Image (tube, rainbow, N blue to C red):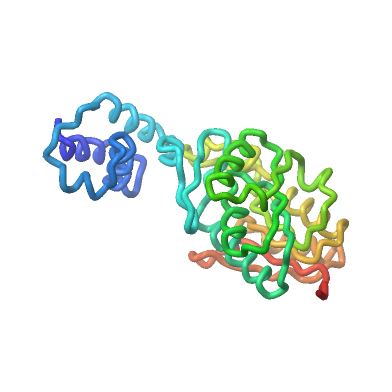
Amino acid sequence: MTIEQALREASVLLSKVSERPRLEAEILMSHLLHKERTWLHTHSDESLGDEEGYRRFVERRRKSEPIEYIVGRVSFYDVELEVGKGVLIARPETELLVDMAAEVIRKHRLQRICEIGVGSGAVSIVLARKFPHLTIVATDISREALGYAEKNIKKYGLHERIELVHTNLLDGVSSECEMIVSNPPYICKAYLLPHSVRYEPQNALIGGECGDELLKEIILTAKRRKIPHLICEMGYDQRESIADFCTQKRLPAPRFYKDLAGLDRGFYLQLATKSR
């Protein structure tokens, strides 16, 4: 079987689970052969040596396993991160969280921030690369996730500026923090997850019975610790709940931001001003 024949066969199989079957077939082939996708196009008539290995990759994807887990990496912003079972796959919409955080860091000249739920390290790594003066304390309750974060942080030479802590929220973190940034679990328990998402760690997805419980805990953490700034990603239907909660707690009104589909995707809460 040639490379092109294998790609065509895989595209047919993947069309049942993917909106981009040919692209995913090529990504899996590139991973198998350790070649760029452009190489596949110029060597399409060559024989595929490991047909069985390729079929195993395709079968895993056909069963809805995320392609990022199969190839062991995901692209996020301007970095490539190692991922696998046990860590959440960074999504494109979370790049908006980074943009909002960058805006606040720049405007208020922040020096030290905390990330709650570091996962693979995506947000902290991109922010640390954007702002060479910035130091970050990043927490997670999952040792598996912290393992991936540590590898990715070392890959980009940021281990001296990003401190990883195994804890819930900011428990036990005593150092100064000028802003919390977080993409916490915010899906409600009853929501039926797509098959591919079920491969990912549920504790990084489910935020409670209603979904917004952890978001509210993070808001209270920022309030209690007198942290001036807070930015969180959230579910598209949680704007009213978060706004009402802030009103109940006599906090400033959050500034919500939308994703590229026009859906509410997160909020910025300025709890206090801090002069330098």
Q: Nearer the viewer, residue 58 or 120?
A: 120
Say above or below: 120 vs 228. above
Quadrant (top left/top right/bottom left/bottom right) for the N terminus: top left
Residue at horizontal 35%, vertical 34%? 62
Can you tell which quarter of the image residue 240 is in? bottom right
- The percent position of residue 257, horizontal first and vertical second, equals 61, 68
239 left or right of 171 in image = left
Quadrant (top left/top right/bottom left/bottom right) for the C terminus: bottom right
Q: Nearer the viewer, residue 113 or 181?
A: 113
Q: Nearer the viewer, residue 180 or 262?
A: 180
Residue at horizontal 69%, vertical 42%? 140
- The percent position of residue 203, horizontal first and vertical second, equals 65, 38
- The percent position of residue 153, horizontal first and vertical second, equals 58, 46
Residue farthest toward the top in the current orientation of the protein: 52
- The percent position of residue 174, horizontal first and vertical second, equals 85, 50
Residue at horizontal 53%, vertical 58%? 93
Say above or below: 141 vs 77. above
25 left or right of 104 in image = left
259 left or right of 204 in image = left
